Amino acid sequence: MRVDVLTLFPEAFEGGPLDVSIIKRAREDGLLDLQVHNIRDHATDRHRSVDDTPFGGGQGMVMRVDVLDRALQHVQGQDGSPGLVVYLSPQGEVLDDSLVRELATNERLILVCGRYEGVDQRFVDHCVDREVSIGDYIVTGGELPAMVLIDAVARHIPGALGDEVSPEEESFADGLLEHPQYTRPAEYNGWAVPEILLSGHHAKIEKWKQEQRLERTRERRPDLLGDSP
Ligand code: 4HQ
């Protein structure tokens, strides 16, 4: 899978979470081809402007449609497939497991990261296929949301999880939270691990884990079970 990122801060993608662990290996193994591009390279005036004041007034600056469109056309021309163009914004549909899986079916994604007050609406209307939010809160730019999306999507590329993590056990598909986890020592500071986990009764342990998952989901995220909180 190829993922292109359009950003004013390409350095935000260097030496971060996409350069370690599972995602680092997926890139090294050629399963994920991440290409980061600087939107400013497509500015045309002598000040290399990428933003301007909003029509109709209001605070802050808006990213220019002409610069964004030139950047996008340039990047789309680098590959046979135009890719699915995704703009990260709080106005988008909220990212969840089903949207992550859907995005992961694309051979190419182009992620557009906004800064300031966002991008000119004409870019969204004419150039963007999907507007996606990582949740109902504001971050400073689309770069962190893009990294979250790339990480979550890359985990669904066949072979990306290698053999230390099973795609089956990591699944969110049955819509339940995970059971609690414990490791040695079996007792610390008088804090004991649930006895059942030390019993060796495999079937009973599996039943206990499933009960824990259901109980936790009912308690913490009843919305996942279709119940009101
Ligand atoms: N922003 N999910 C405003 C977000 C965001 C989010 C990114 C802030 C875009 C212009 N993006 N910029 N939440 O808060 O995706």
Image (cartoon, rainbow, N blue to C red):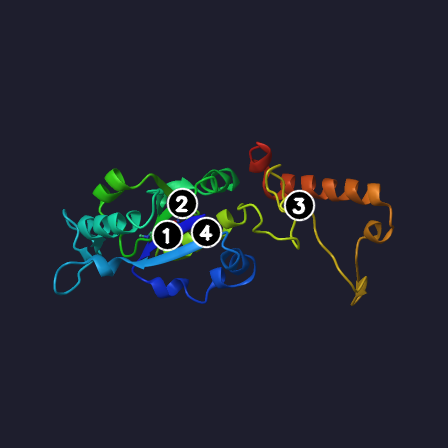
In three-dimensional space, the C-alpha distance between marks 4 and 2, rounded to whole angstroms, equals 12 Å
* Numbered disc in front, either 1 or 4: 1
Can you tell me whether the CB of the residue at mark 2 lies under 8 Å from the nearest atom of ligand 1? no
- Whether residue 137 is visible, yes or no, is no
The reply to whether callout 2 and callout 1 are in contact (CB within 8 Å) is yes
Residue to which mark 1 is pinned:
4
* Numbered disc in front, either 4 or 2: 2
N-term-proximal mark, 3 vs 2: 2
Task: Give residue 220's quadrant in the image.
Answer: top right
Nearer the observer, 226 or 168:
168
Label 1 Cα crowd, 10 Å radius (few <14 / some 14-19 / many 20+) = many
Q: Which mark is residue 108?
A: 2
x and y percentages locating residue 160 in the rendered image: 56, 51
Report how many numbered discs are placed on residues in the image.
4
The reply to whether callout 3 and callout 1 are in contact (CB within 8 Å) is no
Label 4 Cα crowd, 10 Å radius (few <14 / some 14-19 / many 20+) = many
Label 4's element?
A: helix
Residue to which mark 4 is pinned:
150
